[in-house]
Image (spheres, helix red, strand yellow):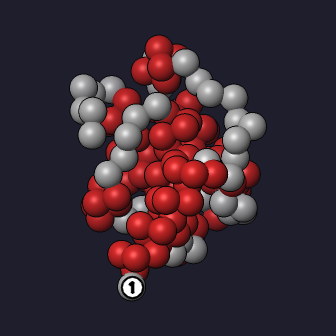
């Protein structure tokens, strides 16, 4: 059942687009030049704005799934948010290794500063 929901969510996102269409895209060169703190700040911004997470709840040691209260559809939104904010494709299975918010920061930092194309 979860796989059907995920496929349906992908279909909807492809047809309608993400729920934050007014966000200003960032240039690929600017993204690659971001330092770790800029990455953290950008992630925290979209978590508070798009996922309505209290800023005080976003700490490096906080658990990603519980802090964001993610279900399978929210993971799709998170993938789209990463792609639109940082300009790289994300595989859903990449989230299997992320437990904490710091793991999430590190993942984005690693992907931005490596030649991984997903």
- The residue indicated by pointer 1 is 1
- Foreground residue, 56 or 98? 98
Residue 10 sits above or below residue 65 on the image: above
Residue at 47%, 14% in the rendered image: 29
Q: Position of residue 11 (x, y in %)?
A: 49, 59
82 or 21, nearer to the observer: 21
Question: Based on the displayed image, in which of its 4 quarters is residue 116 positioned?
Answer: top left
Q: From the viewer's perspective, is residue 88 above or below residue 27? A: below
Q: Quadrant of residue 100?
A: bottom left
At mark 1, the secondary structure is: loop
The structure residue drawn at horizontal position 47% and vertical position 52%, both measured from the top left corner, is 79
**Residue 2 appears left or right of 11:** left
Residue name at image x 51 percent, y 65 percent: 9
Question: Is residue 61 visible in the rendered structure shown here?
Answer: no
For the question of whether residue 99 can be seen, the reply is yes
The location of residue 107, given as percent across then percent down, is 35, 45
Q: Residue at x 49, y 33 (%)?
A: 86
- Is disc 1 surrounded by few (<14), some (14 to 19) or many (20+) residues within 10 Å? few
In the rendered image, the quadrant that contains the N terminus is bottom left
Q: Residue 83 location, x and y as percent?
A: 48, 40
Q: Would residue 2 appear left or right of 74 to someone viewing this image?
A: left
């Amino acid at each position: 059942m979860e796989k059907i929901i995920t496929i349906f969510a992908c279909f909807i996102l492809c047809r309608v687009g993400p729920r934050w269409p007014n966000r200003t895209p960032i240039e690929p060169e600017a993204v690659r030049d971001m330092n770790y703190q800029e990455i953290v700040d950008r992630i925290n911004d979209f978590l508070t704005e798009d996922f309505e997470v209290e800023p005080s709840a976003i700490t490096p040691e906080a658990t990603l799934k519980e802090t964001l209260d993610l279900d399978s559809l929210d993971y799709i939104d998170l993938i789209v948010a990463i792609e639109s904010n940082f300009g790289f494709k994300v595989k859903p299975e990449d989230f299997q290794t992320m437990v904490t918010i710091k793991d999430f920061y590190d993942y984005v930092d690693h992907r931005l500063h490596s030649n991984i194309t997903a």
